[in-house]
Image: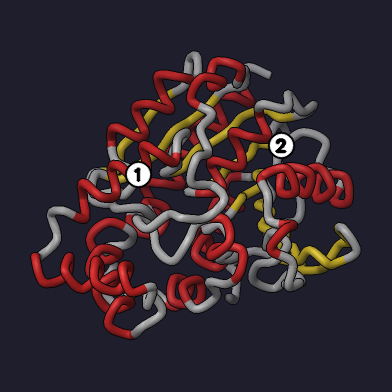
Amino acid sequence: MTSAFPAKEGTLPFKGYNTWYRIVGESEAPGKLPLVCLHGGPGVGHDYLEPLEAAAGTGRRVIFYDQLGCGKSDQPDAPEMWTPELYVEEINVVRAALGLDRIHLLGQSWGGMLAMEYALTQPAGLASVTIASSPCSMTLWVSEANRLRDLLPADVQQTLLAHEAAETTDSPEYLEAMMVFYKRHVCTLDPYPDYVNRTFANVGQVYLTMNGPSEFHVIGTLKDWDITARLPEIRVPTLITSGRYDEATPLIAETVQRGIPGSKWVIFEHSAHMSHAEEPERYIQVLDEFLTEVESKS
């Protein structure tokens, strides 16, 4: 992507491999702090978050990186490595390597789950967290995804069920049926922008290991993940965002908001799961207002 702002890319060492990063913007305006963005999946890379580069226009650098096993970072064949603990550790390594002493942290979807896990470690220098369309419980996520799935056309539901039962979820027919759900609840843009297509083209071992074959057929290692009871331990200013048609349904976002003391929730009325791409100008405005408020009090 050709950015409207100065950008630099590189790699840094992590666990004997290389983690790729991209820094958009040159420095912070007085009183501002950099924004570190955690992509979702788990396992799809940062590409679909590119609209967040516009936050560099609000006086702060925006830092993206592809989590190990994803995107432009090394992708070892090592399913046993892919755990929340690994990715929490990676955040600290990225911060140390790039000299990011005080930051705002934004996580989208799985990235928001990771951001919550990170905040629970009470890291130094974490000024705020933005949780974009993320659950605090995979059981609730699957329950809501299947409620939305039950509203799909009957023939689409039958196709999904047949291939899941036959374990042929890599078939073109299953993927086509899956896209009916995605266009309703993941991204409503038509056609999908290039940066979204690049993300979907990059789904690999991490996603299949931790999640499973699709958003609603979660059979991976995260299937029982649940930090709902620990949310009151998150002690930094927190913004929660979600879309009206989001697979991270209002019930999911409200559960997170109720759990984190003093958190704020904004719903985007014309969005599904990618509010930052579906309503980019409003998203940057809401995000900047939150970050600026946090900075004014620090």
Q: Which amino acid type is shown beneath numbered disc 2?
A: Ile
Height in image: 246 above or below 169? Answer: above
The answer to whether residue 159 shows anywhere in this view is yes
Q: Of residues 117 and 192, which is closer to you in this image?
A: 117
Horizontally, residue 279 falls left or right of residue 99, namely: left
Residue 13 percent location from the top left of the image: 89, 61
Instruction: Count residues near mark 2 (Cα–Cα under 10 Å), then give few for <14, some for 14-19, many for 20+.
Output: some
What residue is at 48 percent from the left and 25 percent from the top? 228
Identity of the residue drawn at 37% across and 58% down: 217
Q: Nearer the viewer, mark 1 or mark 2?
A: 1
* Residue 287 shown left or right of residue 64 in the figure: left
- Is residue 208 positioned above or below 185 on the image? below
The amino acid on which the numbered mark 1 sits, given as a three-letter code, is Ala
Quadrant, the C terminus: top right
**Which of the 4 image quarters holds residue 116?**
top right
Q: Which mark is residue 248?
A: 1
Q: Quadrant of residue 99?
A: top right
Judging depth in this view, the residue of 192 and 165 nearest the camera is 165
Residue 56 tag number = none
